[in-house]
Amino acid sequence: MILSEMITQVFYFTSCAKLSRETFPAQYYRWKNLEVHCNNEQNIRHLALSKNEGTKLHGLSFDRLQLTDQECSGLKKLNFGRFVAREAILDEEYWTAAWLRAEAHWESLSYMRHVDSFKRKYAEQEFYALKRRCFGQEGNSLSCFCFVATKKEDKNVRRTVLNSIVGTLDLSIRQFVQGETYPGEIQRLSAVLASQEPFDAHKYAYIANVCVAKFARRQGIALNMLYLATDVATVAGMKQLFVHVNADNKPAQDLYEKTGFKVVEAALSPMSKDQRILMSMEL
């Protein structure tokens, strides 16, 4: 099959085994063309995968239909316009979110040789890291939610997972460790609580990996995913919500300000090599 034909085909897995969150048998798959938009305002195009790549991603079935409204009952969600933002619960949803992030991460280096291999490796690593985070198995994160924005169910059309998801966002509930005043602060003494104050005093909410498919931009998707994340953090009892944004990404800064975030001036450091700005919202 030539590359031009592969690019136009829908990514799929075929599987005879029952889906499991822990064990997956090897599969074949292809990706269709996909353009996404992430915090850095980049337009991203994904090239097709060959059949045998990614065989470690077992049990995924991208011809799997998206969940119905009835199947999503009880999930944290927010309806808006033609879309709904909600928790991701399927492994296929985690993988699609991971791929959107891989596309965004490598777009500025698209001129590199073998960049598509790097994207696939990044997506695979993010897929497993995302699952670990959502199962509470990573660092100082107490819990993590992966939210996806999907097209609303149409009674006349049953969409696959791949054709439903138009955005993604992570919300984690974390705790400060000793020597840490703000999320991501470099100097830490040890991974223990800063003092003997009440446990909740050291907990905060953090947003990351906000991505929206390019064709779905300017429809309030990122904004409404942020609203959902804010509601979930508030219900969880958090008093403060943080997010990092690239210093040169003015559109993203404007989006967060519209939601209610403000720049944490005390976290700015002229000596820092990190070109990110920390923003915070009081809940």
Image (cartoon, helix red, strand yellow):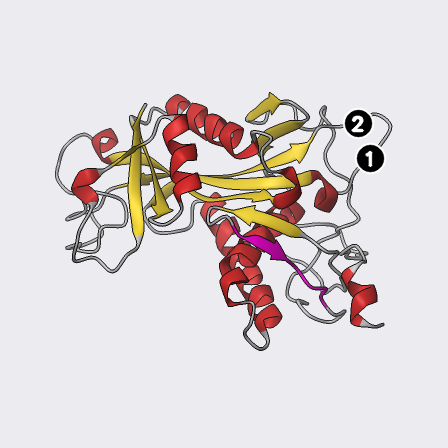
For mark 1, what is the residue?
158
| Residue 109: in magenta span | no
User: Is residue 21 visible from the viewing direction of this image?
Assistant: no
For badge 1, the amino acid type reads Arg
User: Is the Cβ of the residue at disc 2 closer than 8 Å to that at disc 1?
Assistant: yes
Tell which of 118 and 264 is nearer to you: 264
Q: Quadrant of residue 267?
A: top left
Looking at the figure, which quarter contains the C terminus? top left
In the rendered view, does 230 fall on the left or right side of 203? right
Q: Amino acid at mark 2?
A: Asp
Above/below status of 119 relative to 93:
below
* Identity of the residue drawn at 81% across and 58% down: 9
Q: Is residue 91 left or right of residue 275?
A: right
Along the line of sight, the residue nearer the viewer: 22 or 274:
274
- Secondary structure, mark 1, is loop
**C-alpha span from label 2 to label 1:** 7 Å
Residue 156 rendering spot, x and y as whole percentages: 87, 28
**Residue segment shown in magenta:** 42-49
Residue beneath the point at 84% across and 32% down: 157
Q: Nearer the viewer, residue 125 or 165?
A: 165
- Crowd class of label 1 (few under 14; some 14 to 19; many from 20; radius 10 Å): some
Mark 2 is surrounded, within 10 Å at the Cα level, by few (under 14), some (14 to 19) or many (20 or more) other residues, namely few
Q: Which of the pair 88/33 is nearer the observer?
A: 33
SS for dot 2? loop
Q: Is residue 254 visible?
A: yes
Residue 68 location, quadrant: top right
Q: Using the image, determine if residue 206 lies above or below residue 4.
A: above
Q: Position of residue 73 (x, y in %)?
A: 65, 23
Q: Residue 43, image x and y in percent?
A: 58, 52
Dominant SS of magenta comes to: loop
User: Residue 134 placed where, x, y %?
Assistant: 49, 44
Q: Which residue is mark 2?
A: 154
